Each structure stands twice: as C-alpha cells, then as structure tokens.
Amino acid sequence: MSEQPPFSDPGDQPDGDGFDDIVDEETSRDPDLAVIEAGSRTLRTQAGPPQGDPVPTRPADPAVDQALREVEAELATRWGETKLEPSVQRIAALMDVLGEPQRAYPSIHLTGTNGKTSTARMIEALLGAFELRTGRYTSPHVQTITERISLDGAPISAERFIETYQDIKPYVEMVDAAQEYRLSFFEVMTGMAYAAFADAPVDVAVVEVGMGGSWDATNVIDGSVAVITPISLDHTDRLGDTPAAIAEEKAGVIKEGATVILAQQPVDAAQVLLKKAVGADATVAREGMEFGVVSREVAVGGQLLTLRGLGGEYEEVFLPLYGAHQAHNAAVALAAVEAFFGIGAQQARLLDVDTVRQAFASVASPGRLEVVRSSPTVVLDAAHNPAGARAAAEGVQEAFGFSRLIGVVGASGDKDVRGLLEAFEPIFAEVVVTANSTQRAMDPDVLAAVAVEVFGEDRVVVEPRLDEALDAAITLAEEEGEYGGAGVLVTGSVITVGEARLLLRGKG
C-alpha cells in the first residue's frame, strides 16, 4: 500500500462541545445570497480539467463489441440478480480455486438501502486523490456492464472485462460442477471484480453489496472499514419487513475488529447495528455524533459543504451533486476514508484539506439527480423505493426550483410503487408512466392504475414506450415556453434511467 497521505496542520481544532446540535439539513442564511456567494467560491474550489462522461459506451471496435456481447449472453444464462439462494458457499468455493484474490488487498465494504453507489464513488475519489490505486465494485450498472468494475476511478475497458471473464471461466465451470446450483450472474461478476483487483493490483478495494450483507456474494472479504448507509424498506420479501430485520442481515458486513461508519439510521436499525458492532469488538463512528454535515449551501452546479470528520472540520468543500442526501453521503465517505487511514481511533488529525476538496470536486454519480438535457431541463434519478424518492424530490425542489415538473416513471414490479409515487406526488404537476425494456418492468397499465389513485386521472399520461414517454413529458414541459421554468424528472428504476440516459444524453 502507498504511504499514508499528507495531513493538514490541525490548527484550531473544534473542541467538540455542542456537536449533538450539528446542523445537518441546510443553512439558515438567505438562499439567494447563498447561491451567489457559494457560486463564486465554487469556481475557486473546482480543480483539474472537465471530466468526460463517467459511463462507458459500447466498444467502437465491432470485434470487441461482439466478444463483449458473447460474454454478456453467457452471463445472462445464469440466475439473475433477483433470484437468490442465501449462501456464500458457492462464491467461497470460487475464491478458493482462484487462490483467494480478495485477500490480496484491504477493503472498504458498503451496505445499506440507499446511497451506496454515490458513497462508494466518493470514497474512491478520496482514496485516489491520496495516490492509492483503487478498485471499485458497484451494482447495478446504469448503461454498460463494464461500469460495475472500476480501476483507478474508471470502468475497466471492454477488452479487460472480456479477458477477466475468460481467465476465470474454467474455474467458474469447475465450481458449477461441484455445487448444487450454478454460480449466479452476481457471483460470477463478484469473482471477476476480485480477480481484476488482485491482478491490477490495487491498494484498496471499495466494494458495494448487491443485496443484504451476511449472505451477499461480496461478503467473502474482510473489510477493515464497514460502511452502512441509511436503511429503509426495500427487498422486503428477502431481507425482512422492518428496518430492524433488514439491519440484522446488513450487519453481516461488520467484521471482527473493524471500524463501522454508520449513517443516520432508524432507531430500531441502529440498535441492531450497534449490538452487532459490540459483539464484533468493532469501533463505531455515528453520523451526527462523531462526524456529520456541519453546514451546506446551494452552489452553482452542486453544493458547498462544511463537513465534520473524525479528525476535525473540513470547510468549503464543493460537491458537484445535488440534494441533502448527497451531503450526508459525503460525510459518510469522508469518515470512511479517515477511518481507513487510522484517523479517529489512532490519531486526531485532518487529512490534507486541499486534497479532500479536490477529490470531492471531481465526483460524479451518473443517474443521481443528473442533468442530461436543457430547454427544457431533464433530470435523471435512479430512485426506486420511497426513501430514495423522498430524497430525490427534496433535492429537485432545492436545486432547480422548477415552476412545473413533469415526471416520467418506469418502475420494477417488485417495488413499493405506491410509496414511490406518493413521495413524488407533491412535486409532479403531471406524471407519464411507462416501462423499461426488461422483464422486471411493471406493466404500464398496472402502474397507471396505481398512479391514478395517487395523482388523479387528469394528471396521469400512459406511454408504454420509454422514448415516447420522454417525448410526451418534454412536450408537456415545453408548453410553458422557453422561459417558463418547467422541467422533467425521469425516475423509478436504475434501468429506466440508464435507458433514458442513452436516449437523451448529448441531445440537450
């Protein structure tokens, strides 16, 4: 591993008194002044050249594209990500025959219900800024399967993805033959990620669970830092129907002697997680207690934050993402990286503040309140459960101030669609219900029936094809004219957002 990063002069450190009263929502200052002042400071805090699209496109080389499609087709013959047999037996067997690649590097392991991918991207950016070679494994992908495995902040190339699959394929088949069930799609992807990280090699892996924790395929790693983002109800048929029951499963990522970074949690979930941490002799840092968001201001292109980390305060941190939830994700990410470097338990010093600012200013999180078109403005957000929808709704209202907002919703059939629609009802003038191209998509007519109950018949439009739904929503938004301030929010599913992104990006 690379050397520890440079630290800032601790200077005047806060004494910690009154931190229970931390301001973790929004500043009380005049919002118009905040926009102007924060916007000017934004220009000073951003660093480096403009970033390209963080989401890869299909390979330009027809031969490579064909080879990638063949790999995708082979993976598609396996159990999909929604079909599970709760066990780490198969992935453990694969790791064994591969020579335990997941033990070749330390890991930061993330679970929770919402915010995992954005937080993982922030952790990756921070570690990379301190010159550590990173591997990041997240799911699902927005547009292209290669997004799931990243090295040094960028998705691996299609060529490397294909090569990694071919390298482990004989071992996968060996495990398939010895097990009651073949390895699933997600288990093979996890094996590929761990093998790619060992081959690179990386200094640290940032790994997001697929679902749950204890029996998730990623849980063959021993994360020295376990991150638990906010827990809410999702996948209740597999994880439990209360936050406490879900927390019981997700607590499985907490390993003996680890440091646990806890985002704000429902009380019953927090109790379960803290009990597990005590049993594992783990060190716990809680948002709102040991770390958190001190203040935040809306800024041009994002928000300006003061974060309280495990070692002290970091001021004027520009984050080019929208919404209070992303500020909280940033606080969690910062604490996780501090814990990885031993700050808090072993020492109380700041990471180099300029490096932290540079890292956060470089963060991108595709499909998370992402603007992909202007005139009218079209925003994408992958919210797919009520808690995520509430966060997205609050973020849109704060950051954009649309005079009229049209929703485009395409959801999966196994989600709490009513709860999702109810979260958006106060901010959508009208909603266009549609479907993405997958078999998991809820039938648009069924979705429309629920939407009518929530919005009323006059506010619901049905367009079964996503491209036509987007056109209909944009037309509705354009009725206010060029200066009307109307916008479109596309949401309901990562898949819907990914497909919309392909249709819209670059057309604005």
Image: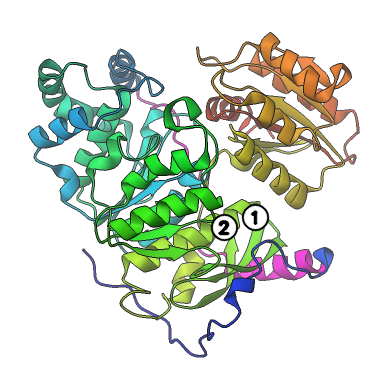
493 or 270: nearer the viewer? 270
Label 1: how many Cα within 10 Å (few below 14, some 14–19, many 20+)? many
In the rendering, at what x and y percent does residue 291 appear? Answer: 50, 68
124 or 413: nearer the viewer? 413
For residue 328, which numbered disc appears in the image? 2
The residue at the point 52 percent across, 90 percent down is 12
In the picture, residue 448 is in which quadrant? top right
Marks 2 and 1, Cα distance to the nearest angstrom?
6 Å
The residue at the point 16 percent across, 29 percent down is 168
Q: Is residue 463 above or below residue 354?
A: above
Could you say whether the residue bearing mark 2 is in a helix, strand or loop?
helix
For residue 324, which numbered disc appears in the image? 1
Q: Mark 2–mark 1 contact, CB under 8 Å?
A: yes
Q: Is residue 21 above or below residue 1?
A: below
Q: Is residue 115 above or below residue 203?
A: above
Label 2: how many Cα within 10 Å (few below 14, some 14–19, many 20+)? many
Could you say whether the residue bearing mark 1 is in a helix, strand or loop?
helix
In the rendering, at what x and y percent does residue 282 appear? Answer: 31, 62
In the rendering, at what x and y percent does residue 393 appear? Answer: 71, 42
| Amino acid type of the residue tagged 1 in the rendering | Ala
In the rendering, at what x and y percent does residue 274 appear? Answer: 41, 57
Residue extending farthest bottom: 12
For residue 419, which numbered disc appears in the image? none
Where are the magenta residues, as a range? 33-61
User: Image check: 134 left or right of 453?
Assistant: left
Figure quadrant of the N terminus: bottom left
| Amino acid type of the residue tagged 2 in the rendering | His
In the picture, residue 88 is in which quadrant? top left
User: Image check: 457 left or right of 160?
Assistant: right
116 or 137: nearer the viewer? 116
The residue at the point 42 percent across, 59 percent down is 261
Can residue 124 be seen in the rendering of this structure?
Answer: no
